[in-house]
Image: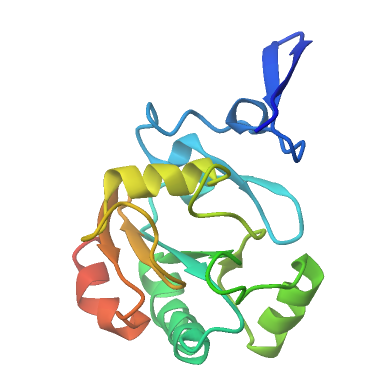
Amino acid sequence: MRIIKFMLPTGFVYLARNFAVVAAMSGNKDYKSATSIYDFTANSIRGEEVPLSKYKDHVCLIVNVASKCGLTATNYKELNELYDEYAESKGLRILAFPCNQFNGQEPGDSEEICSFADRHKVKFDLFEKINVNGDNTHPLWAYLKKEKGGILGDFIKWNFTKFIVNKEGKVVERHGPNVNPSDLKVHLEKYF
């Protein structure tokens, strides 16, 4: 990977070959020294930077999503149902991150993903498409994996891997793609 280094008044900034600014520039803490999800930012699907500290005092469900996966219909439907049941009454927040790393099942740009979400009446928070594995993993996802590794390794194995985060921003549970959102109710109830 080609790295470019330049100086700003706030210090050195490194840019990767695709010229995406790494964690230091985007307000994200190095995932290894982060203490909660509140140390990170992510861009909404509309491109606005969102400090995850806005979710303080909320139980969060963080999930990587795709629009063309065999698990899509069930997961989107049940994520909406969880949102309807718990967002207002218990303060649940669902943070969905589109990802195209699994068999190219999220090929669209932000506009196409928004259109898909509108057709499915998505009510939960949707973010820009990111990488959850590899050299360009979003720092939040590197942190999630560090905090709760998987059975066969820390990497994300497929679409719809789910992380439960408590009200203090700590990762408390990880569930694989085979666990439907409705199956998480008993788990979520422990943290409300």
Quarter of the image where one finds residue 162: bottom left
Q: Nearer the viewer, residue 99 or 182?
A: 99
Residue plotted at (47% across, 34% down): 39
Please identify the quadrant where the N terminus is shown: top right
Residue plotted at (27% across, 54% down): 153
Q: Determine whether 95 is above or below 24 in the image.
A: below
Residue plotted at (20% across, 76% down): 186
Side (left or right) of 126 relative to 6: left
Count every numbered label the image shows and give the total.
0
Q: What's the image's color scheme?
A: rainbow
Side (left or right) of 93 relative to 120: left
Q: Determine whether 85 is above or below 91 in the image.
A: below
Residue 37 placement (x, y as % from top left): 42, 43
Residue plotted at (27% across, 76% down): 184
Residue 60 placement (x, y as % from top left): 40, 60
Q: Residue furthest front?
A: 1
Residue 152 placement (x, y as % from top left): 23, 60
Side (left or right) of 188 relative to 113: left
- Whether residue 53 is visible to the viewer of this picture, yes or no, is no
Please identify the quadrant where the C terminus is shown: bottom left
